[in-house]
C-alpha cells in the first residue's frame, strides 16, 4: 500500500504542490448535483483546476443499481481499477479530490481510493471556492495523462453488508454502533425526498455531515473529535459503522474522523436506500 498522506490539503498548500512540479499529481473534480446529475460535469467543462479529470458520482464513483442495492452502490474492484487506469493512476500518484459542496462528493472519491489500497489521496479543504479565492488558475482543457494498468486491493473489513448489519441487530453477530450522516429530519423520518421510505436503522445515532464544516471548511481536528465524542459518549469512535442515505455523505464523517487522527472506520455502503428497499428490515422513526 502507498504511504498515507494527511486527509486534507488547503488551497495554498495545493498551489505550492502544483507549482513545485516534483510529484505526479492527479486532480479529481468531483462536483455533482443529486437533483441534476449532469451539472457537475458541465461545471467541469466550464472550468476546472488545471489537469483535473472529472469524477462523476454515478458513472465513476458508483456501480450499477439493481433497485435493491441502494442509490450509489460501490463499484466493483474491476470497474474501479478500469476507472483509475483511465485517469492514469500509478502507485506513486498523489490524488487530490475537490468539489463545490464542502467535500460531500470529494470525500466519496477519497474513501474509494483508500478502500482500493491507494493511501496517497487528499481532499481539497474548501474545494473549488477555496481554490478560486487563493488565486488558483482555471483551465478548460481535458487532462492529458496516459492510461495505466491500475490495481485495486479492497481493504478487508472496511465494508459491512446489509445482512451483517441485520445479524448484529438480531444478536446473531457482535453489536455495532451505526452513525447516520443524514440531516436530522430525514433521520427522524420527516421530509424524505430521496428514498421511498423515511426513518433510520434501529439503534443508529445521528451526526449530520455538514456539522463537520465551518465556513465551508473542516473544523479543527480537536473540535471535531470533541463533537463526535459528545454525540456518542463512551463509544470507541474507531469502531463505528458509518452510513447515510446511499453511502456518500457517510464518507464525509469518515474523512472528518481521519482528519481528527482516528484510523479508518467501517462503512455500510448500501446505507438507508438499500436497507429500506427490503420491507423485512426493521425501521425506526423519531430522534432516537
Image: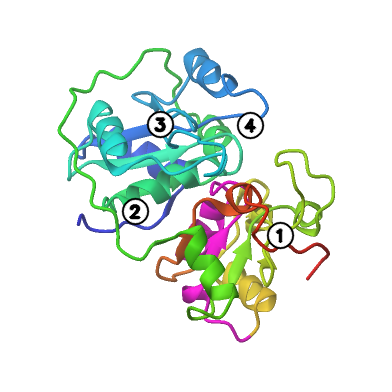
**Quarter containing the N terminus:** bottom left
Q: Nearer the viewer, residue 93 or 107?
A: 107
Left or right relative to 265: residue 274: right
Residue drawn at 51 percent across, 36 percent down? 66
Colour scheme of this structure image? Answer: rainbow
Q: Which residue is mark 3?
A: 60
Q: Which residue is mark 2?
A: 115
Q: Secondary structure at mark 4?
A: loop
Mark 1 and mark 2: Cα distance apart in space: 25 Å
Q: Is residue 43 above or below residue 235?
A: above
Position of residue 74 measured from the top left corner of the image (x, y, whole percent): 43, 44
Q: Is residue 126 magenta?
A: no
Residue placed under numbered mark 4 in the picture:
34
What residue is shown at x 59% (from left), y 68% (from top)? Answer: 178
Q: Secondary structure at mark 3?
A: loop
Q: Position of residue 25 (x, y in %)?
A: 27, 36
Q: Of the residues tagged 1 and 2, which is closer to the observer?
A: 1
Q: Earlier in the sequence, mark 1 or mark 3?
A: 3
Q: Kindly indicate whether the residue at mark 2 contacts the one at mark 1 (C-beta within 8 angstroms).
A: no
Residue 200: mark: 1
Q: Answer with mark 1 or mark 4, whichever residue precedes in sequence.
A: 4
Q: How far across and down, in percent of the image, does residue 266 sit?
A: 45, 64
Residue in the foreground of this view, choosing between 206 and 119: 206
Figure quadrant of residue 86: top left
Amino acid at each position: 500500500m502507498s504511504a498515507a498522506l494527511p486527509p486534507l490539503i488547503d488551497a495554498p498548500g495545493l498551489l505550492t504542490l502544483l507549482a513545485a512540479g516534483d510529484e505526479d499529481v492527479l486532480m479529481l473534480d468531483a462536483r455533482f448535483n443529486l437533483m441534476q446529475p449532469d451539472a457537475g460535469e458541465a461545471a467541469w467543462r466550464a472550468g476546472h483546476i488545471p489537469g483535473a479529470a472529472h469524477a462523476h458520482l454515478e458513472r465513476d464513483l458508483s456501480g450499477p443499481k439493481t433497485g435493491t442495492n441502494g442509490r450509489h452502490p460501490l463499484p466493483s474492484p474491476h470497474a474501479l481499477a478500469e476507472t483509475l487506469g483511465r485517469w492514469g493512476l500509478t502507485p506513486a500518484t498523489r490524488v487530490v479530490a475537490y468539489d463545490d459542496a464542502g467535500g460531500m462528493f470529494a470525500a466519496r472519491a477519497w474513501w474509494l481510493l483508500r478502500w482500493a489500497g491507494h493511501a496517497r489521496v487528499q481532499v481539497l479543504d474548501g474545494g473549488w471556492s477555496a481554490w478560486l479565492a487563493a488565486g488558483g488558475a482555471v483551465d478548460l482543457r481535458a487532462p492529458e495523462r496516459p492510461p495505466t494498468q491500475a490495481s485495486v486491493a479492497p481493504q478487508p473489513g472496511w465494508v459491512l453488508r446489509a445482512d451483517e448489519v441485520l445479524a448484529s441487530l438480531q444478536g446473531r453477530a457482535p453489536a455495532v454502533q451505526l452513525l447516520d450522516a443524514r440531516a436530522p429530519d430525514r433521520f427522524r423520518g420527516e421530509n424524505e425526498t430521496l428514498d421511498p421510505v423515511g426513518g433510520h436503522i434501529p439503534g443508529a445515532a445521528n451526526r449530520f455531515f455538514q456539522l463537520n464544516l465551518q465556513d465551508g471548511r473542516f473544523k479543527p481536528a480537536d473540535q471535531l473529535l470533541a463533537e463526535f465524542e459528545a454525540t456518542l459518549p463512551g463509544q470507541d469512535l474507531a469502531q463505528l459503522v458509518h452510513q447515510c442515505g446511499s453511502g456518500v455523505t457517510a464518507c464525509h464523517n469518515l474523512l472528518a474522523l481521519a482528519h481528527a487522527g482516528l484510523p479508518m472506520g467501517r462503512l455500510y455502503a448500501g446505507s438507508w436506500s438499500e436497507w429500506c428497499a427490503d420491507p423485512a428490515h426493521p425501521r425506526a422513526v423519531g430522534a432516537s
